[in-house]
Image (cartoon, coloured by chain):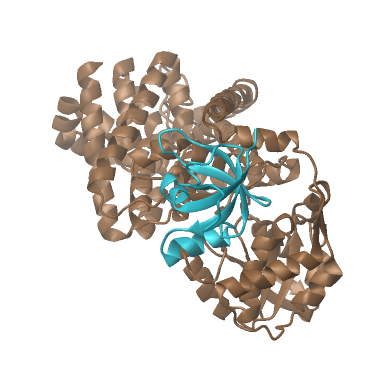
Amino acid sequence: MKILLMGNPNVGKSVVFSRLTGVGVIASNYPGTTVSYTRGFTKIGDDRVEVIDVPGTYTLEPTSEAEEVAARMLDEGDVVVNVVDATNLERNLYLTLQLLERHVPVVVALNIWDDTKHRGINIDLEKLRELLGIPVTPTVAVAGEGIKELVDSIPRAVSPDMPARSRDERWAAIGGIIDQVQHITHRHHTWRERLADASVKPLSGGVIALVILACAFFIVRFIGESLIGYVFDPLFNTLWTPVLSWLGNLMGSTGFLHDIVIGKLIDGELDFVQSFGLLSSGLYVPFAMVLPYIFSFYLVLGLLEDAGYLPRLGVLMDTVMHRLGLHGYAIIPTLLGLGCNVPAILATRILESTRGRFIAATLISIAVPCAALQAMIFGLVGERGVQYVAIVYGTLFVVWVILGIILRHTTRGFTPELLIEIPPYRMPLWQAVLQKLWMRTYGFLKEAVPIILGAVLVINVLYFLGVFGAIADFTAPVITGLLGLPKEAVTALVIGFLRKDVALGMLAPLALSSEQLVVGSVVLAMFFPCIATFVVLLRELGVVNMLKSAGIMISSALIAGGILNLIL
Amino acid sequence: MSDRKQVSLTMLKAGQSGRIVQVQGGPGLINRLSVMGVRPGGRITKVSSMLMRGPVTVQIGRTQVAMGFGMARRVIVEVVGAGT
């Protein structure tokens, strides 16, 4: 048996899914969090049944690509669990009626039930069950309430004889149902609603956005730097260094094997950044430089997501984003890209047009550095002075804007207008935020650390075989002539294809001037996506557009790097 | 034709309410807006609009919807009361 979870966007389908299957999925407070299907299994009685989390849709008459897929998906399911936002019953029932007209067995999960009371909404459950002719279970999925009852109701799913209706007839029918089951008591605006309104007004909204983004930045920095300075650095220096010294002596302090495992000694000393051994830099880079920032970035992002702020930022940024050939909602994948480009490029699916997805994905992979790379920029460029970090970010921002303007004029197609639902502000639940943070942090450890170790290994072998020397001589005209970097810097660009954090680390032993380090960081950020991003880009854009995108990346990286080299 | 004033959403002031009279557009737009609650007969309150022909945010029942300027221009409402 297959169960489909269907419902309007942002009603909590993914939370219900997690509760049913125990499979962790990212859930947030904005429409379009789920862009692809997630499958999991749950038990009903003694039966193991498949549960599919379908992206949100307002209607089965497809108005967008995502909805078309959702409608097609319907043929696959045996039972639909229609997740309904109890605070928005009227609008949600449109899909419910459409589902019933399709003659599939349906049960309703009346989610966000807890919110109805303090919003002055009174729903007559018995009456609603009677009028729809199907089981209706009130749930508070984030708290796990009503989930057991929901599961118990699934075997009772039925397909009542619902006549096919036209759109107007359907709305009329819904009007009739609402009149009988819902009673709303008037109440005054809460402070949360006032804040919500203020966040989408030009002046107050701008101020709120600046305050939130500035706070977010400083909190990310503060937590990241504190974790590095008070936890990970001391851990590595006091506990790990002695172990490595002992092991290094045992291995004779030199030789190929020693250099791979422990790393090259710098002035007779182990250097966690420059030594580049598996057990030195291979562990220090991911754990002591990148992990603290992954943790702090995703903590703050999770809070912003769950509070429901991001769609409002989309409204504020809409006019600006149209200049780049996108609309305001593209700000969400862009912000996700500051964490990791992979989910960011997947999230471009919330944009309606192929053109929008191409522009957004290209801009993200070129000008939006991921948290791992940013952590390394803070660590290595930050040592030289905050102004150099500012130049790196400033350059990437200018590239983002200029390239966006160029792409807007050169990419075929048109950019549709913004049309989004803005969710109410909700107080983020610590449990949910921490669970999401854990999933993302664990995802980094599971996927990035092996690649980082692999990259360190590859670097050592390539050095040993002298391959880098050959490449360096070959590319010297560009690297040295155009970018003003030592020819060995090309090794970082090559390794950048594996992981950009490790790659930036490779610039550390080259004794670059601060200006060179800035050029190197910018070119590395822009030049080419890391392999994980590359794979996703290829899948999302297709071969032709990926080649186009890659061409844009390489040329814009060389142009930006060349210009920086000239003016710095 | 009512003697009440009919304006597009872009002309409505922030805080003003109205009743939706018509959505001028193709079936696609009418459908997309209607499933989000923007359909003739419904009561709508304008929350805000961004500068430079930016998006318009409206409140319909319990839902807030933001739509581009071009869409908002096609939504015709009958003004029912001035807000703050």
Q: Residue furthest bottom?
A: A161
Q: Nearer the viewer, residue A58 or A74?
A: A58
- How many marks the image carries: the answer is 0
On-image quarter of the C terminus of chain A = top left
Q: Nearer the viewer, residue A532 or A450?
A: A532
**Image-quadrant location for residue A17:** bottom right
Q: Nearer the viewer, residue A506 or A202?
A: A202
- Output the letter for the chain in cyan: B
**Compared with residue B68, is residue A24 higher up or lower down, i.e. above or below?**
below
Left or right of A119 in this view: A480:
left
Q: Residue furthest front?
A: B3
On-image quarter of the N terminus of chain A = bottom right
Left or right of B71 in this view: A12:
right
Q: Position of residue A76 (x, y in %)?
A: 56, 79
Q: Position of residue A540 (x, y in %)?
A: 38, 58
- Residue A421 seen from this side: no
- Residue A292 seen from this side: yes
Left or right of A198 in this view: A358:
left
Q: Position of residue A438 (x, y in %)?
A: 65, 44
**Compared with residue A378, is residue A355 higher up or lower down, i.e. above or below?**
below
Q: Nearer the viewer, residue A332 or A453?
A: A332
Q: Position of residue A269 (x, y in %)?
A: 46, 19
- Output the letter for the chain in brown: A
Residue at (56% x, 60% y) in the render: B40
Residue at (48% x, 41% y) in the render: B11
